[in-house]
Image: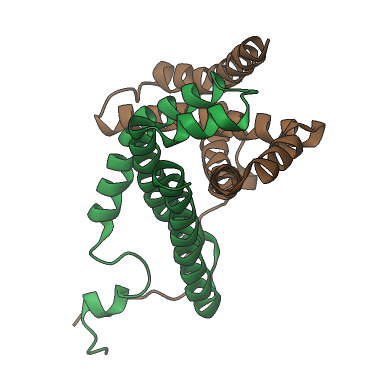
Amino acid sequence: MSMQTPLGRVRGLGPARSGTSHFWWQRLTAVANIVLTLFLLFSIVFHVGDDYASVTAYLGSPFVGIGLMLFILSVVFHMYLGFKVIIEDYVQHEGWKILFLMGNTFFCIAIGFACLFAVLKLSFGS
Amino acid sequence: MVKYRTSAERPLSPHLQIYRLTMTMMMSIAHRISGAMLYFGTFLLAWWLIAAASNENYFNHVNALFSTHIGRTILLGYTWALIHHMLGGMRHLLWDTGSGFGKKSIEILAYGTFFGSIGLTILIWFVGYWVRG
């Protein structure tokens, strides 16, 4: 006979009590991604082959910069949530799972900050 | 007190390889694979943005790498993964409202995702080459 509570038994085995939050943010960023990705796609497709000066001028203009930064935030959060699920599904070993989940967080934050820094430099910098 | 059993004495559910391949199943798998491709693809976006923020020489260098045959092939795959994941995601958003689950609907949506993603990818690249002139 176990004295463990049902909650204690499932804790650590998955997203205990945080499933709806994950679901909601996944959907919210998904909707934002549709609009922001279309914006980025149009931006890239209509500037294919442009030279350095016109590309940096375009990326550094206020509306494009704001759009890009919103795109980066939404996409990075969305991919953080999505890849977390992939890791939780396929990595069975507890130690590796924690390492991969940490790696996922680090990768997403690093990519997000690198992109944001580049856009900010294009907007404000020389 | 009830004793809950969580050990492996239960029969295990059969996994992927035992089922006949269906279009809906393959689109589900492709959604996850394209998502993982996009995850690593953001590395390319970060690289390109950093190149643009660095200097003209480095920007031209990165653009030249992206323009090679291998570079273009990777970017073509990136475009397809993006469009496929977007269409697949719209399908999921539709399902979230509770509609689109009919036997016919799921087939139409699955084939629509597949052919739609290929068609739109070709269209985007066609426009890209047309803009480049």
Q: How is the image coloured?
A: by chain
Q: Percent x, y for residue B19?
A: 60, 40
- B107, B122: nearer the viewer: B122
**Residue B76 in view, yes or no:** yes
- A105, B26: nearer the viewer: A105
Answer with left or right where residue A17 lies relative to residue A59: left
Please report the residue visible at 48 percent of the width from the left and 25 percent of the height from the top.
A43
From the image, which quarter does the N terminus of chain A lie in? bottom left
- A62, B113: nearer the viewer: A62
The color chain B is rendered in = brown
Please report the residue visible at 65 percent of the width from the left and 46 percent of the height from the top.
B17
Please, which residue is most extreme toward the front here? A126
Please, which residue is most extreme toward the left here? B1
Image position of B4 with respect to B63: above or below? below
Q: Percent x, y for residue B68?
A: 79, 33
Please report the residue visible at 61 percent of the width from the left and 12 percent of the height from the top.
B131
The color chain A is rendered in = green
- A62, A67: nearer the viewer: A62
**Residue B12 in view, yes or no:** no
Image position of A54 with respect to A95: above or below? above
Please report the residue visible at 23 percent of the width from the left and 76 percent of the height from the top.
A6
Count the labels in the image.
0
Please, which residue is most extreme toward the right here? B69
Answer with left or right where residue A87 lies relative to residue A68: right
Q: Percent x, y for residue A39?
A: 41, 26
Q: Percent x, y for residue A106?
A: 47, 66
Q: Quadrant of residue B25?
A: top right
